[in-house]
Amino acid sequence: MPKKIKIYQIDSFTDKPFSGNPAGVTFSNELSREEMQFIAREMNLSETAFLSKPALSADMSDKADYELKWFTPTTEVELCGHGTIASLHFLYEEKKLNEKQDLTFQTLSGLLKCKAENGRYFMQIPIFDMEEFEECKQELISILGIHPTMLDDKVPFIQLSNKNVYIHIKELKELHKLKPDFKALKELSLEKNLGGVVVFTPETVDKNNFAHSRYFTPSHGIDEDPVTGSTNGPLLLVLERLGFLKYSGKETSVTFEQGDVLGRKGRIGVSYYHDKNELYISGNAVTVLKGEIIF
C-alpha cells in the first residue's frame, strides 16, 4: 500500500507569496533517509525539511520537542535557516505551535531553541569560530567574477568553522552584477573543502537595513540560495569582527537583505544577546502550497 504524507511548500523570510526562500516541509515518523532524499529531489527546492518525534535513542531526545532534518536535492545538510522558519510555520498552521510558545528541535547542529511571537518565527543559530581566509583567494575572486576594484584591501576574507567563506565588496550594484562560474566554484569547493561563499556589502536596498548578501553553494547542489538564515545569522558576528558593527547594551539587532537579484526579496532579522552569547534569526513565512506526496 503506498505511503501518503502531507507536505507544504512555504516561503520563508517574507509575508508575500512567491518571494523569500521556498522550502518543503513534511511530518512523519516513518521515513528512511533514502526516502527523505527522494522526496527532496522530487520537490527540487533548495531544502526540504523533515519533522518527526525525537529519536528515543538520542542523548538529546528528552529535551527536544521534535527532530528536524534538512535535505537539498542532492544531500543532507547540518543547518538550514529558512527550512526551520518554514517548519515553525508548518507547526503553527497544524496547531502544534502556539503564539509565544518555546520549542526545541533536535538537529545535526545540536539543540536549536525556537519560538513564535507576534507573527514572526525565531530560531537560534550556532555560533561558529572564525578566522581570516587566505588559501585560494585569487582563484576564488576570479571564479566569482569579482574585479579587484570591488574589494577593500583593508577588509580580509573570513571563513567560519562550518567552512563558509564571507567576502566583502564595496557596492550593491557590483554585488548584483556578479555571475560566478558555478562549475568551477563547485570543483574548487570540493578540492579545498570549502562550504558556500557569502558575498556581502553594507549598501542596502532599504535604508533601514544593515547589509545585503548573496550566497553561492553549488557543492551542496544549489548554485545560489535566495534567502539564507544560516549565513545571515553569522553575518552579524562577521561584521563585528571586521569593524562594521559595534555592540552596545545587552542586545544587538539588525535586519539583513537577500534575494532581490533573484526576484525573491527576503528580509532576515538577526539578534545577538551578548550576556548569553546567543544568536537568533527571525522572519515571517507564508504557505503557498498544500498537498500529499504519494510513493
Image (cartoon, rainbow, N blue to C red):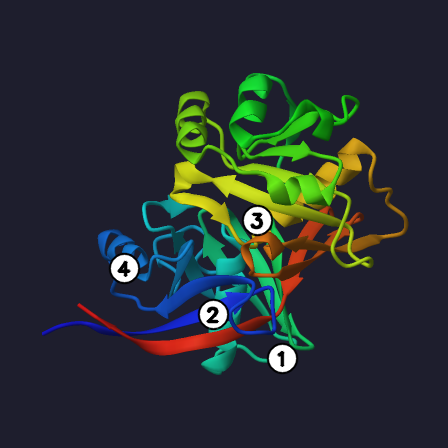
Residue sticking out furthest to the bottom: 95
Residue 151 located left or right of residue 289: right
Q: Is residue 155 above or below residue 80?
A: above
Tell me the SS state at disc 3.
Answer: helix
Q: Is the residue marked by circle 2 packed among few (<14), some (14-19), or many (20+) residues within 10 Å? A: many
Mark 2 and mark 4 in contact (Cβ < 8 Å)?
Answer: no
| Measured Cα–Cα span from mark 1 to mark 3 | 23 Å
> Which residue is disc 3 drawn over?
230
| Measured Cα–Cα span from mark 3 to mark 2 | 17 Å
Q: Position of residue 66 (x, y in %)?
A: 44, 64
Point out the tag, 1 or 2, that comes first from the N-terminus.
2
**Residue at the location (29% across, 55% down)?**
41
> Which residue is disc 2 drawn over?
10
Residue 63: tell me if it is visible: no
Q: Is residue 29 above or below residue 163?
A: below
Point out the tag, 4 or 3, that comes first from the N-terminus.
4
Q: Nearer the viewer, mark 1 or mark 3?
A: 3
Q: Nearer the viewer, mark 3 or mark 2?
A: 2
Point out the tag, 4 or 1, that comes first from the N-terminus.
4
Q: Residue 42 — which label?
A: 4
Residue 146 located left or right of residue 208: left
> Which residue is disc 1 drawn over?
99
Q: Nearer the viewer, mark 1 or mark 2?
A: 2
| Measured Cα–Cα span from mark 1 to mark 2 | 19 Å
